[in-house]
Image (cartoon, coloured by chain):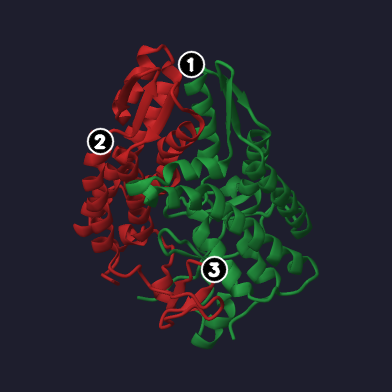
Chain colours: A red, B green
Amino acid sequence: MNGIPCAREYKVTLCHVCSYVCPDDAHECPRCDSPVHRRKPNSLTRTWAFLIAGLIFYIPANLLPVMYTTMLGSSSENTIMSGVIEFAEGGSWDIAILIFIASVVVPCIKFLVLGLLLVTCQRRSTWAMRERSRLFRFIELIGYWSMLDVLVVALVAALVQFRGLSTIEPRLGILFFGLVVVMTMLAAMTFDPRLIWDAEVEDVR
Amino acid sequence: MTPATPAPMTDISHRQAHASEQPPVPAIAETQTRADQWIICEHCDSVYEAMPLNKGAAAYCLRCAAILRRSHRLSIEQLLALSIAACVLFIFANVFPVISISMQGLHNEVTLWGSVQALAQGQITLIALVAGLAIILAPALQIALLFWVLAHAHRGEIAPGFKMCMRTLEHLRPWSMLEVCLLGILVAIVKLAGMLDVHAGVGLWAMAMLMVLIVLIAGKDIRRLWDELGVGPE
């Protein structure tokens, strides 16, 4: 340790809702009445649960179609990847890359980083703690951008409603995709980044 | 192990400065009174002593490099003004269509609510609820609650239900996704521009401005009201 004291040494705990410095035997923040915990309860187990649920939903999210298009009599179903490929073949590389990042790269990075954080925290590793803290803040920041595809499908499906000429409808895949985003967001919220630093000191869970 | 004194907060200009001075360890009774001036890093539990920040400066945790606190860019009065502006823009963004299209003489347009409704079909209705929360309900509640607490704070009062409002604001923040919605509208425009005539509606412009305002007013900065209004433990 580099001389910076921990909250534990002063017998205080941070309230995550209002930033009040609570005495560490408090169960409720004296200022805002929200529950206070020294560490988020069962953080590792709950994060694993949300992460695995997200991974399971990610399979149908990619396999099932997200959009059903009828255009002058002919109809087609698009999955997320086939939508990206269509854009790329149509020449709009920028949009193809944007959607690819939002719906494939971001969720995959979240799965990998959360998995890495969970495993290293369980092994009480002291490896690259500062960098792992940064990684956690990064996935908290990028997490909700995956909702992009859901909102694009919603807008497009609401707009293209010309009976007989052309219609677009959302399909089941988008539900699973939305659930992946919600699950990974919940996983990031239940993970307690202070666990990364607990490897330095004795177990305080 | 004897605890060291909380390290003083540092601002950007001298980030690597002194990690700790060495006055004597505070006695237990002293601890609670001094605790009001402490900042605990929410990412690593390090304790620091709060120091006034220069305008535009931010304090970083020396251990995990997270931001501890930023100086306030806006006054309560300015925040209140912006939340009223956000309220007007929110109404515009929801009443007027965000995109309109035309195809072979046919015309169609969509509002935010319309796009949420398009998702509410049979099995996938659940995702319509998530989308409705993210782009309509959460921002609406944020604006209403901010207006409520700020309007009272402006007169130096603590709003009725202040604690509940502030807690709700904290829990809503991650679910408010106007930035993503704006990008989604732009992507949808480009996506449809290939096959139809697409026009941006009034709602889109309102949405773009609203997004900037929400970023300015709905951040963690609002927690300052606890201290500035002197809301303490009972």
B93 left or right of B135 in image: right
In depth, the one of B103 and B43 nearer the eye is B103
Q: Is residue B125 above or below residue B39?
A: above
SS of the residue at dot 3?
A: helix
Instruction: Confirm whether residue B51 shows in the render.
Output: no
Viewer-side residue, B128 vs B205: B128
Q: Are marks 2 and 1 on the same chain?
A: no
Residue A129 shown left or right of residue B230 in the figure: left
Observer-side mark, 3 or 1, equals 1
* Residue matched to label 2: A64
Name the chain under label 3. B
Q: Are marks 2 and 3 on the same chain?
A: no
Type of amino acid at the residue the image marks with label 3: Arg
Q: Report the amino acid beneath label 1.
A: Met
- Label 2, label 3: how many angstroms apart (C-alpha)? 38 Å
Q: Amino acid at mark 2?
A: Leu
Question: Residue under circle 1?
Answer: B195
Q: Which residue is mark 3?
A: B167
Q: Residues within 10 Å of mark 2 (few under 14, many from 20)?
A: some
Image quadrant where one finds the C terminus of chain B: bottom right
